[in-house]
């Protein structure tokens, strides 16, 4: 999301809510995965999406 916003896209909270957290693309159920990237350190996790306005979204029931 942050990269898209940095590229000039406008992301709304409703659009963000339509994204499923279940990953389906590029996943092989039989497990043929490359492991040469396992030593790479990921970027620090930032749970806040300051780029998206959540003020117009109703809380989940």
Image: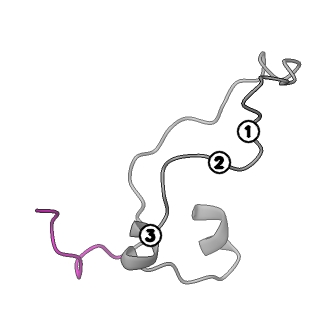
Contact (CB < 8 A) between labels 1 and 2? yes
Q: Earlier in the sequence, mark 3 or mark 1?
A: 3
Q: Is residue 15 visible?
A: yes
Q: Is residue 36 above or below residue 47?
A: above
On the rendered structure, is 60 left or right of 13?
left
Give, as a single range, the part of the protein colored magenta: 53-61
Q: Secondary structure at mark 2?
A: loop
- Res 51 seen here: no
**Marks 3/1: CA–CA distance:** 20 Å
Dot 2: few (<14), some (14–19), or many (≥20) neighbours within 10 Å?
Answer: few
Q: Which mark is residue 18?
A: 3
The local secondary structure at tag 3 comes to loop
Q: Position of residue 60 (x, y in %)?
A: 17, 63
Residue that badge 2 annotates: 24
Which quadrant holds the N terminus? bottom right
Residue at 50% over, 78% down = 11
Residue at 66 percent across and 31 percent down: it is 42
**Any magenta on residue 55?**
yes
């Amino acid at each position: 999301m942050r990269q898209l916003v940095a590229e000039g896209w406008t992301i709304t909270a409703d659009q963000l809510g339509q994204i499923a957290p279940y990953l389906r693309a590029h996943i092989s159920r039989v497990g043929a995965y490359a492991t040469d990237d396992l030593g790479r350190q990921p970027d620090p996790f930032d749970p806040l999406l300051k780029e998206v306005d959540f003020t117009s979204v109703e809380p989940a029931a």
